[in-house]
Image (tube, rainbow, N blue to C red):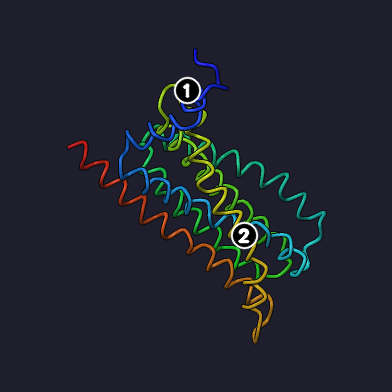
């Protein structure tokens, strides 16, 4: 085993996994990284705005915490289970496509909450749908990324794939508050929230298109 502190050891530990990934997948590696980057983007964009939305529509912290810890937790577990079953039954790509569609729908559904106000039943339904969809999509993405890694480089390649959406998402979410403020110019704040969540959901469209392209290319390469 080559020591890590030698030049060869550094190459094997850091450069080797990247080189191997692009060697195996060629130009498709770029499409894969782009798809993964966009796949989590809607979640990153909306993440900072959930609590401000709850506050501005009049939901108390106790209600939010209770719903998240009860209905939300159950929905998450059901979504994870459904995602895992779908991946095993139908494969990675169909599950990825279903996951991003679900993600877009449940994120856009927060526009319903913005217009419904502090209705606990509506909030519970929105949270249940969101946690199910996000849980399902999360399992779909993790399963897909795990399938792309090579034996011997699993940890490093998985870190590469994860960073593809982490860096893009963390950069993008810094603009969430600014976007809501701009949308609120000339219209009620809750209308601005509704438009924001619908727009954030649409950020999943590039991931959906890339998933479809990757599914088709992968299918064609096997025939």
Left or right: residue 72 versus residue 60 is left
Left or right: residue 54 versus residue 175 is right
Left or right: residue 89 versus residue 158 is left
Q: Is residue 172 above or below residue 193?
A: above
Q: Which mark is residue 8?
A: 1
The crowding category of the residue bearing disc 1, from other C-alpha atoms within 10 Å (few below 14, some 14 to 19, many at least 20), is few
Q: Is residue 51 above or below residue 156?
A: below
Residue at 67% from the left image edge and 68% from the top image edge: 177
Farthest residue toward the left? 223
Residue 122: give x, y in percent of width and height. Answer: 65, 62
Q: Which mark is residue 151?
A: none
Q: Residue 129 versus residue 29: which sits nearer the camera? A: 29
SS of the residue under disc 2: helix
Q: What count of labels does the image hold?
A: 2
Farthest residue toward the top? 1
Instruction: Say which residue label 2 marks.
Output: 173
Residue 176: give x, y in percent of width and height. Answer: 63, 65
Q: Residue 5 versus residue 107: which sits nearer the camera? A: 5
Residue 54: give x, y in percent of width and height. Answer: 73, 63
- 2 vs 1, front mark: 1
The crowding category of the residue bearing disc 2, from other C-alpha atoms within 10 Å (few below 14, some 14 to 19, many at least 20), is some
Residue 116: give x, y in percent of width and height. Answer: 66, 70
Residue at 77% from the left image edge and 50% from the top image edge: 65
Would you say the residues marked 2 and 1 are in contact, meaning their CB atoms lie under 8 Å apart? no
Residue at 65% from the left image edge and 84% from the top image edge: 187
SS of the residue under disc 1: helix
Whichever of callouts 2 and 1 sits on the residue coming sooner in the sequence is: 1
Residue at 41% from the left image edge and 43% from the top image edge: 95
Q: Residue 208 versus residue 150: which sits nearer the camera? A: 150
**What's the distance in space between the residues labelled 2 and 1, CA to CA?**
38 Å
């Amino acid at each position: 085993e080559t020591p890590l502190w030698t030049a060869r050891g550094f190459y094997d530990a850091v450069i080797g996994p990247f080189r191997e990934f692009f060697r195996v997948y060629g130009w498709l590696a770029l499409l894969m990284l782009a798809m993964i980057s966009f796949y989590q983007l809607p979640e990153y964009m909306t993440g900072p705005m959930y609590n401000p939305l709850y506050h501005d529509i009049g939901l108390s912290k106790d209600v939010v915490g209770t719903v998240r810890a009860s209905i939300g937790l159950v929905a998450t577990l059901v979504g994870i289970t459904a995602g895992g079953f779908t991946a095993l039954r139908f494969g990675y790509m169909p599950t990825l496509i279903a996951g991003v569609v679900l993600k877009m729908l449940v994120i856009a559904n927060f526009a319903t909450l913005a217009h419904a106000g502090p209705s606990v039943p509506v909030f519970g339904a929105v949270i249940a749908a969101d946690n199910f969809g996000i849980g399902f999509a999360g399992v779909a993405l993790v399963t897909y990324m795990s399938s792309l890694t090579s034996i011997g480089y699993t940890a490093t390649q998985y870190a590469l794939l994860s960073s593809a959406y982490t860096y893009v998402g963390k950069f993008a979410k810094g603009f969430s508050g600014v976007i809501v403020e701009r949308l609120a110019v000339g219209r009620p704040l809750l209308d601005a929230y509704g438009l924001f969540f619908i727009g954030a959901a649409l950020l999943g469209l590039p991931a959906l298109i890339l998933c479809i392209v990757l599914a088709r290319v992968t299918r064609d390469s096997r025939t």
